[in-house]
Image (cartoon, rainbow, N blue to C red):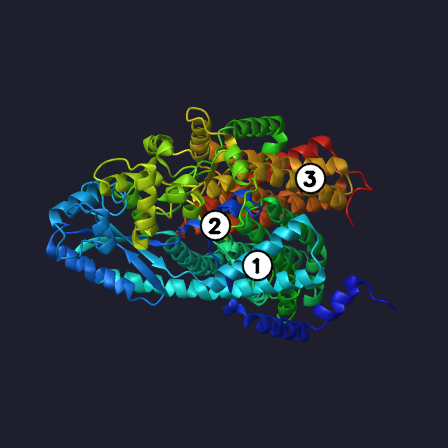
Amino acid sequence: MKLSPISLYDKLVLGKPVATLLLVFLITAFFGWFVPDLRIDISSDSLVLEKDEDLRYYNSIRARYGSDDYLILTYAPRGRLFETETLNDLRALRDSLTAIERVESVISILDVPLVQSPPMSLEELEKHIRTLSDPDTNLALAERELRESPLYRNRLVSEDGDTTALQVNFRRDRTYQQLRQSRDELREKRLEAKLTSEEAQELERLTNEFKRYSAELMAQQEADIAHIRAIMDRYRDRAELHLGGVPMIVADMVDFVRHDIRVFGIGVVAIMALLLIVAFRQPRWVILSLLTALATAVVTTGFLGLAGWHVTVVSSNFLALLLIFVLSLTIHLIVRYRELHVQHPDEMQLYLVRETVHSKFIPCFYMVITTMVAFGSLVVSGIRPVIDFGWIMGISLTAALVLTFTLFPAALMLLKPGTPHKPRDLTTAITGLFPPLIERHGNLVLGAAILAVVLGVVGMSKLTVENRFIDHFHETTEIYRGMYLMDRKLGGTTPLEVVINPPAAFLKEKQEPFDTEEDDDPWDDTDLQGEAGITGTSYWFNVFMVDEVDAIHGYLDGIDETGKVLSLSTTLEVLKQINGGEVPDNFSLAILYKRLPDEVKQKVITPYLSPDGNQLRFAVRVYESDVNLKRQALLEKIRQELTGELGLSADQVHLTGMLVLYNNMLQSLFRSQIVTLGAVFLAIFLMFIVLFRSVKLAVIALVPNLVAVPLVLGLMGGSGIPLDFMTITIAAISIGIGVDDTIHYVHRFGKEVAVDWDYLAAVRRSHGSIGRAMYYTTVTITIGFSILVLSKFVPTIYFGILTAFAMLIALVANFTVLPVLLEKLKPYGKKDIMK
């Protein structure tokens, strides 16, 4: 005879608890072996959209002009900067940094070319490049040049001359670059057409190899930065030092994630243990709940390590969420078991456990599914860490459901029922406050809910995605202090690159065929245009375009939000100094370009002009700490001014850099918020129809959750808390977890109303039974999310506080709005009651 799934479960799990526990132990041990393989990934990809066309352009520009992935070390001596003792100390610091194996070079005031200390001719410059370290350098003139030169002012030296910067450049890892390029090429090809089986296998291999190599490189980079900080510590008694730059931010955020995982895990376990002790006063419930939660955490973490999934700053709270969710599941089982034990004090343990599991599996199953749908809606965000967070929580919830209904009941089967414990008066008193309110003031409850939604919608209208990256960190962190100092003293932090192409007509003319019989290299500038050199073939590098280049530079430099601007205009200022203060003519420009030492050319020309001379790059740094910074408005203003007042065509102007990529991600958040909310509400509504077998009941069940979301988003808008890659998840998660209480209440209410068809009596009984479990789980979840305030990452703190607030609102709505609607609309008939 074929056994039903329920009978098979009873036979295997409840009938053989020891074997079940042994199997669970072996599975947990297997996945536990891979827990150390869990990797943390905090790369620049965390701040950009997955299929952003600007990302592709950014990578191409970075490949041409160089990467912005370097460290900036600021040095502010106790005494004067330009005195011998200080310069010797700075030299020792530079040499210590240069000695690190992966450091390719260190750029400081000691190493940059000086052309006015005293003034040098081109002939002298060809023979020898003077630096601050040279014995013939005039120190007073050097100080003046470094503080006033357009190349170095607010870049290597602050205007007041008391702070300098050292740029630490790491060697480019060619293996990393090749793996990334090969992977990205196949990814782009997959977007346009279906890959062959061989290409799909190669993409999978490259992806795994890139992840592995990236993890190794990340570990090495962390070690290098730790080494640099150890070196800095040796100089802190003589100077104030700060470290900045993308690699440092990445390394510190990895530490933040590790801190959050550790603190969240320990904090949640400790708080949950205390809550379970206070709520149930029996060691068995504390031990079984925590055992189930910890086993689920080990299995999930081990699976992620085995599968090679990486944890980011967005998903760093997955462990805390998982522990909270497992405990909420076990609390529902505990409350139901204790109810049955009070009702049937003489029954055997098998009966109590079996009835507990049978009565709670369906609502718990749908509770998990709806929460998975909520997290699953995050995959449409387009932001890789948010997408991964959705998938990680889907896997975690699956493990939570399986272990809650295997480990927990199997372990409970090995214990004796003990003495029945009646519900505590405090919990009953709290849940008992609501039925009289529903009976006497049902219309007032609905009116208050409508008013709350209206106020929430008003607040939502003020939601913004504009936020400062610096505000993601506490003021005491190295990231915040370093960015703030560089904004104040060294010309800004966030890179923005303005790339200007020549007119399309010029490019078309360049592409016309010409005779190359006598020239093997048609792009050799000197031969092509005789003595004119590059000035004869370049659209920008000639005297005719100097004024236009200067106008663009001047406009960008004059914007309030921008700090240091470097470009070909800066270079031309330096060339004027070499040329005796005169603007060189085309012939002189070509001679200067040809005769400039490569070391000088790499610093003053190559970063701002393409090799063919037809593309300009303006390297702009934006003040990240500017309270008035509005990225989208700034970018739109720059485009409008360049194509309007300055007369460039739209296809000539390209804005790129981390500011653009980060802004694209922020601007996508509104769309993502709408899409995720729509997706999660639709999916949950359809699931309600399947679960409750009634469209009317599904609509009623959805209403309480429509109260919590506008309120939490309205609170964000009214309080000026912007949407970011963390807070975008709050609404979907609040719905997914909030409907858990809705499902349990409706499930229990259906059974209670069938007793006597007295809806108000059913409300009282439901609040006195399932209401206690809802109260316990909500308190557990709220306090659990409150643990996130211990994070070092400010968006995570907002996420914890706001989600906890949403959980409380959802509980109140389920205790008031839901029963009022059930009582007034009376959706149940005898055929509608769930079996």
- Of circles 2 and 1, the one toward us is 1
- SS class, disc 2: helix
Q: Nearer the viewer, residue 222 or 795?
A: 222
Position of 742 relative to 336 (above/below):
above
Identified at 78% across, 44% down, the residue is 833
For the view shown, which residue lies furthest in the top direction? Answer: 645
The numbered mark, 3 or 2, whose residue comes first in the sequence reads 3
Q: Quadrant of residue 380?
A: top right
Instruction: Read off the residue under disc 2.
Output: 783
- Of circles 3 and 2, the one toward us is 3
Instruction: Read off the residue under disc 3.
Output: 682
- SS class, disc 1: helix
- SS class, disc 3: helix
Identified at 35% across, 30% down, the residue is 547
What percent of the width, then of the height, locates residue 259? 41, 59
Q: Amino acid at mark 3?
A: Leu
Instruction: Read off the residue under disc 1.
Output: 182
What percent of the width, then of the height, locates residue 418? 60, 66
Q: Amino acid at mark 2?
A: Ile
